[in-house]
Amino acid sequence: MLFKFLKLPFNVLKSLRRYVEEIIGYSISNKFIKIYKGNVTTVDKASLNDVLKIFNQNFPNRSEKKLIRYSQLFQNIFYVLQYNGKSVGYCSYYIQPTLSLRRIRKFAVIFSIAVDFNFSRKGFGEALLRESIKELKANNIESIWLFVNAENNAAIGLYKKIGFETIDIIENMYGKGKSGYKMRLLLN
Ligand SMILES: CC(C)(COP(=O)(O)OP(=O)(O)OC[C@H]1O[C@@H](n2cnc3c(N)ncnc32)[C@H](O)[C@@H]1OP(=O)(O)O)[C@@H](O)C(=O)NCCC(=O)NCCS
């Protein structure tokens, strides 16, 4: 009981911090300079429906609530790949700002990435990452972070191919005995 009581202010502070980070992240991504990215666009009302189908196909047990929220809050860094007039994959990021002595340092975190089952292993995941990374780099993002299930060989293969390195192993991150990797790609 006492432990629960002591935890309350800590949780409130944590939520407040995340809220402030989201506001700063929003204002950073909102000012993003757009570059040409071929078949990769940013999410809009029409493509969000396809994106949600791909999300539910790949992550049937997860809630789509946060993905919808990020499609609005971080719309400029929510990338969608078009193929023959259809959205076949997406990569959604959020900005993680960090205060240093003289400036705000800008990191991007991959919140979710997936490709439609019917279009897998055709280079679409790689194209989504490469094109979005070009734009993040052009906007002075220092590095990109992500978390991945250590058993997800397809995603790990993709991240390694792009140049991500594993910087931490988090035990039990995806359930008992199921580790996660924290991976990072330095951009500058
Ligand atoms: C991970 C994912 C996005 C890859 O997309 P994709 O379009 O199928 O991948 P690509 O065709 O662009 O492949 C690029 C590289 O990724 C790796 N890769 C992709 N699928 C793989 C698989 N099934 N097994 C091993 N490596 C694989 C390979 O290194 C591949 O390069 P190669 O073709 O030269 O060998 C896709 O498998 C997916 O949507 N997975 C389910 C959702 C998911 O797990 N998201 C990540 C959560 S962290």
Image: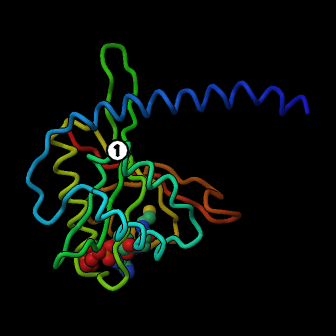
Q: Residue furthest bottom?
A: 118
- Residue pictured at 14% horizontal, 39% vertical: 33
Q: Is residue 62 visible?
A: yes
Q: Position of residue 134 (x, y in %)?
A: 16, 50
> Considering the image in quadrants, where does the C terminus appear?
top left
Q: Quadrant location of residue 87?
A: bottom left
Q: How many marks?
A: 1
Disc 1 target residue = 74
- Residue pictured at 69% horizontal, 27% vertical: 10
Q: Tell me, what colour scheme is on the image?
A: rainbow
* Residue density around tag 1, few if under 14, some if 14–19, many if 20 or more, within 10 Å: many
Q: Is residue 51 above or below residue 84?
A: above
Image quarter for ligand 1 = bottom left
- Residue pictured at 51% horizontal, 60% vertical: 64
Q: Position of residue 60 (x, y in %)?
A: 55, 73
Q: Is residue 156 visible?
A: no
**Residue 139 falls left or right of residue 16:** left
> Considering the image in quadrants, where does the N terminus appear?
top right
Q: Position of residue 108 (x, y in %)?
A: 34, 43
Q: Position of residue 38 (x, y in %)?
A: 10, 63
Q: Is residue 119 above or below residue 45?
A: below
Q: Residue furthest top?
A: 102
SS class of the residue under badge 1? loop
Q: Quadrant location of residue 162?
A: bottom left
Q: Mark 1: is the Cβ under 8 angstroms from ligand 1?
A: no
- Residue pictured at 37% horizontal, 19% vertical: 100
Q: Residue furthest front?
A: 45
Q: Is residue 141 above or below residue 134?
A: above
Q: Is residue 183 above or below residue 53?
A: above
Instruction: Identify residue type, mark 1.
Output: Phe
